[in-house]
Amino acid sequence: ERIPRRVIGSQSSTGRTTPVSTPLNILDLSAVLEGIDPLTKFAIEEMDPLTQMATESAAKEQQNILNPNKKSKESKRSSDMEPWSVRKNAILAKFTTSEKLSIVTSFLSDGEKVVVKAQSSAVDKVQHRLEQLDYFEEGSQHKLDVSQSEYVGRIGQLNRELVSAWNSEQRVKALKIAIQCAKLLSDTDVLRFYPSKFVLVTDILDSFGQLVYERLRTKSDYIRPGTQISTALPEDFTPDMVPESAKETCRNWFYKIASIRELVPRIYVEMAILKSYSFLTSRYTIKN
């Protein structure tokens, strides 16, 4: 359908008009923008699993912006979040592989374990810890190619070794295990399995961070104002309630981790103990 329209600046004496075509059906932009366009969909299929999950999440956010009504429904569903244990099991079940996985460790090779000897004096205890540290640094490491089930089993064994070392006062060994577990996240050879590996390894790092936090709490008994009774810190404690000795121990943990030479394990291990910042400052308090 053609509608006559006068052209601005044209000579009025000619009386000519410029035809303009106007479609009868107006293009519905909301229908075009609904969902993911073909090019983006193709790009997502070529991505690694973690980037794919992040891109799909961003696409959903974009759809929520274009569809406010749909966003309200999504917000209502997200308010009832599923437990992490359920989400973790779903990730482990989804991201599997039949390829061989490499694991390098000096703590589980051939089932060897460091024998803990009783120390009769403080000097013997310090000497034993130094010998332990030398053993972990200089001990032979074996690179093993294992199946997925064997890999999961060895990760679980590392977790038990970390807790056992911590409970037997071997803080150095526990830290070394946490560092070595964090190093596993640098290996991206089998991308399909990486999300599952991330879940398994970060579970160990979470355990380590919780052990450090609880250790600092046990060293942070304080005396209530107006009394002479020493009591444990409450759940909602503030840094001014923490004794200076406990704060010094907390700083020492962060100093030790800051001295890790490799970037990836240094970042992940420090993230694991971020909750312990609450002993030093209330600015970065992290809740459970």
Image (spheres, rainbow, N blue to C red):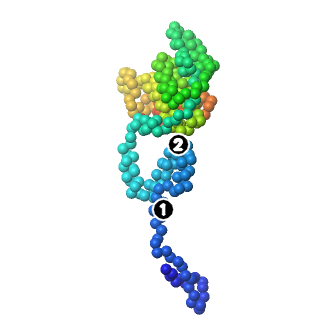
Label 2: state its secondary structure: helix
Quick one: which residue is furthest to the top in this view? 120
Badge 2: residue crowd in 10 Å (few <14, some 14–19, many ≥20): some
| Residue with the mark numbered 2 | 49
Q: Which of 7 and 188 is in front in this view?
A: 188
Task: Give how far across and how far down residue 8 sits, in percent.
Answer: 57, 82
Residue at 53% x, 56% y: name it: 38
Could you say where residue 200 lies in the image, as x and y percent from the top left? 49, 32
Residue 82 on image: x %, y %? 38, 40
Q: Taking the image as drawn, is residue 274 in sight?
A: no
Give how far apart the Cα atoms at labels 2 and 1 are: 27 Å
Q: Is residue 110 above or below residue 20?
A: above
Crowding around mark 1 (Cα neighbors within 10 Å: few <14, some 14 to 19, many 20+) is: few
Q: Quadrant of residue 68?
A: bottom left
Residue visible at 43% across and 35% down?
89
Asked if residue 10 can be seen in this view, the reply is yes
Residue at the image position 48 percent from the left and 54 percent from the top: 62
Q: Who's the residue at 52% across and 52% down the image? A: 41
| Residue occupied by mark 1 | 32
Tell me the amino acid under the disc marked 1. Val
Residue 34 spot, x, y in % from top left: 46, 58
Q: Identify the mark at residue 283; answer none if there is no mark.
A: none
Q: How many marks?
A: 2
Is the residue under label 1 in contact with that under label 2 (CB below 8 Å)? no
The first of marks 2 and 1 along the sequence is: 1
> Which residue type does callout 2 highlight?
Pro
In the displayed structure, 285 sits above or below 160; it is below
